Image: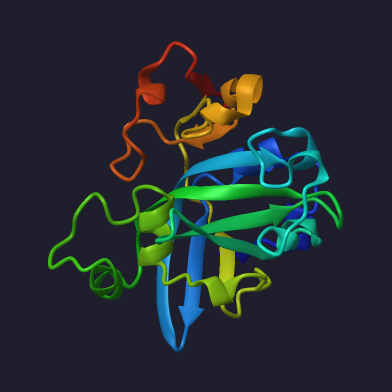
Amino acid sequence: MQLLHREFYQRNNVVQIAQELIGKLLITKFDGVITSGRIVETEAYAGKTDKASHAYNGRRTNRNTMMYYDGGVSYIYICYGMHTLFNVVTNTSDVPDAVLIRGIEPMDGLTIMLERCKKSTPHPTIGRGPGNSGKALGFHLYHNGLPLSGKEIGIYDDAFPVKSIHSSKRIGVDYAGDDANLPYRFFIPGHLQVTQHANNKSAKAAALTV
């Protein structure tokens, strides 16, 4: 099992990185507690040129400032005032690309994940969707900007064989005009932790070569 290093994240193709993150192992180590999940769904956001991105047209705020850092750090924000969403910053300084982790399959620390998600027994919603993924892995706003160095957050390649990856347009970005139709969402088809959405079965969903 090998930690993904900065060079992986600091490439200039956020869409490719989002696809390549599928099947990787995301591990958190917070306050001595280790939890992990296999990444099964991602979305790419292409910085200043992407109308769905927080940084579209060079917008820079207190919330999105981490997007402008060198790739290989976390970008975490609160959605709808309640969901903590974890993103991977990519590319180099001042190029605000990021990948949203939309779904993870629970691996290590399932008991802890159940407690965090207020569940008594395993359930497909644990790790399904970006809010549930963030909750299961213990992310909080104060984890924003942490390096993906493996000390507290790390993403690893454990040679897991991904048999199929599909792409589709992203979810919940209808405000982005034509950019809402970009095929920047990647997922393992049929996986329980992948968001159940019409895009999964649409004609625009495409199987990719793995």
Left or right of 192, for residue 167: right
Between residues 81 and 98, which one lies in front from this camera angle? 81
Q: Is residue 162 visible?
A: yes
Q: Residue furthest bottom?
A: 32
What residue is drawn where x is 49% and y is 79%? 29
Q: Tell me which corner region of the image, top left, top right, bottom left or bottom right, holds residue 112.
A: bottom left
Q: Quadrant of the N terminus?
A: bottom right
Between residues 178 and 130, which one lies in front from this camera angle? 178
Q: Tell me which corner region of the image, top left, top right, bottom left or bottom right, holds residue 194.
A: top left
What residue is drawn where x is 62% and y is 48%? 99
**Residue 182 percent across, percent down from the top left:** 62, 24
- Tell me: residue 107, above or below residue 197: below
Q: Residue furthest left?
A: 120
**Residue 120 percent across, percent down from the top left:** 13, 68
What residue is drawn where x is 51% and y is 51%? 101
Total labels drawn:
0
What residue is drawn where x is 35% and y is 54%? 127
Left or right of 133, for residue 123: left
**Residue 146 percent across, percent down from the top left:** 65, 73
Left or right of 141, for residue 192: left
Q: Quadrant of the C terminus?
A: top right
The image's colouring method is: rainbow
Q: Is residue 210 visible?
A: no
**Residue 205 percent across, percent down from the top left:** 47, 19
